[in-house]
Image (cartoon, helix red, strand yellow):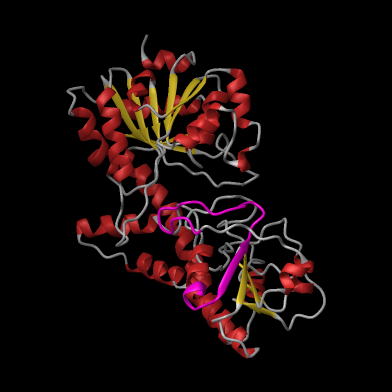
Amino acid sequence: MSLEQKITDHSAVIGVIGLGYVGLPLLAAFHRAGFSVIGFDVDPKKIASLRRGENYLKHLGESLVGDMNRAGRFEASGDPSRLNEADAILICVPTPLGKHQEPDLGYVERTADDIARTLRRGQLIVLESTTYPGTTREIILPRLTARGLKLGSDFFLAYSPEREDPGRKDFNTQTIPKLVGGIDAASGNIAAALYRQAIQQVIPVSSAQVAEAAKLLENIYRAVNIALVNEMKTVLSAMGIDVWEVIRAAATKPFGYQPFYPGPGLGGHCIPIDPFYLTWKAREVGLPTRFIELAGQINHAMPQYVVERLALALNDRGKAVKGSRILVLGLAYKPDVDDVRESPSFELIEKLSDLGATVDYNDPHVPATHRMRKYGDLGMKSVPLTPQTLAGYDCVLIATHHAAYDWQMIADHAKLIVDTRNALRNVTGRRDHIVSA
């Protein structure tokens, strides 16, 4: 039976490599569409959790994995030799930056090598990880053709960028439109046919490179606009003007403007990282990306700006950062999820600790820190958030505006608050202990 037929009658087995914030919901979408699915990951803890029916990504719902286990057609495996059991393999592995802000495609390369070792006729391979234009053709394709199989007839290769936004309520994996670009026309067509079985809207583009570049443009658009309001924040603050009120006022224009909001720094896998993939690749064609790089410099300077604002606020009250007790509210990079990838809270904690402060954190969604690529494991646990706890700190730093926080209680009992998210805009009572940053 051909791959096209298997896709049409849902007898195709779908393999997803990388069961994190992108891979697990994608796996669930195809399972929900009636396909048999195999999830692959190198983390044995994830595999064990999935086999027990436990979901480690709480924003997807407690019952997600248990429901898949009970329904059947779902396996979790850490064995790459089983990749040949899948008719379609979707790659959702990390694409971080190296020490010098260069692309680190090690996960993609190792995954492509694993696939190549078991590649067989009739398989479709799709890369979903965000990367620079040309990665699918230049990094994955040579590894697959080295086995002697022919692209477009023996196997198929495409790129379809993930667009996940963890915790978002108005869109999910099935309802977010899906871009698909093949290395050749046959690969693009069959990849689009596959995604149409699980995703409501699929948009084919002419090539994998177009799809790769489109994903970068989406994220660079956000990065440069966030940099703009971050810079406006520093300038308007020096002028004594509330940047948040300015943004609200500008947003009343019904056309030609979209509001973006400042913060303590960028977080998540996409915005802090993806623009640098394009700046690196642009050097290959001898062109600078000054605008993108400037936006990166502004955004990456925000944690230091926040620390300086906090230090000045303490100084105005006769205290130094050294020896002060500081409570950071929010370890996740965005509200109401447990996603701490690239969260600026870690840099804030590091900088304040280096200045001699004793730093704790509270996050209702992150009970304890865990090992990360950049910061390792800080060995910290979320402290209770009570009036007594708040009163024991010299400063409370709001880094993430979780809905679970009682902002009035926080405002009533904290000695000094540095608010990077405009979280205290609606509290009543005195405000002379609240500093915007």
How far across and how far down the image is residue 185, in percent?
A: 31, 29
| In the displayed structure image, the side of residue 275 where residue 435 appears, left or right | right
Above or below for 368 versus 40: below
- Residue at point 45%, 73% (across, down): 301
How far across and how far down the image is residue 61, in percent?
A: 65, 37
Q: Which residues are magenta?
A: 352-378
> For the stretch drawn in magenta, what is the main secondary structure?
loop
- Residue at point 77%, 69% (across, down): 388
Of 17 and 385, the residue lying toward us: 385
Task: Check if residue 376 falls in the magenta segment.
Answer: yes
- Displayed quadrant of residue 254: bottom right
Of 59 and 188, the residue lying toward us: 59
Above or below for 177 versus 404: above
**Furthest residue in direction right, as rendered:** 429
How far across and how far down the image is residue 351, in percent?
A: 48, 72
**Furthest residue in direction top, as rendered:** 1
- Displayed quadrant of residue 326: bottom right
Quadrant where the image shows the N terminus: top left
How far across and how far down the image is residue 287, in percent?
A: 24, 62
Q: Is residue 183 something one can see in this rendering?
A: no
Task: Check if residue 390 falls in the magenta segment.
Answer: no
Q: Is residue 76 something one can see in this rendering?
A: yes
Above or below for 280 versus 55: below
- Residue at point 62%, 75% (across, down): 325
Quadrant where the image shows the C terminus: bottom right
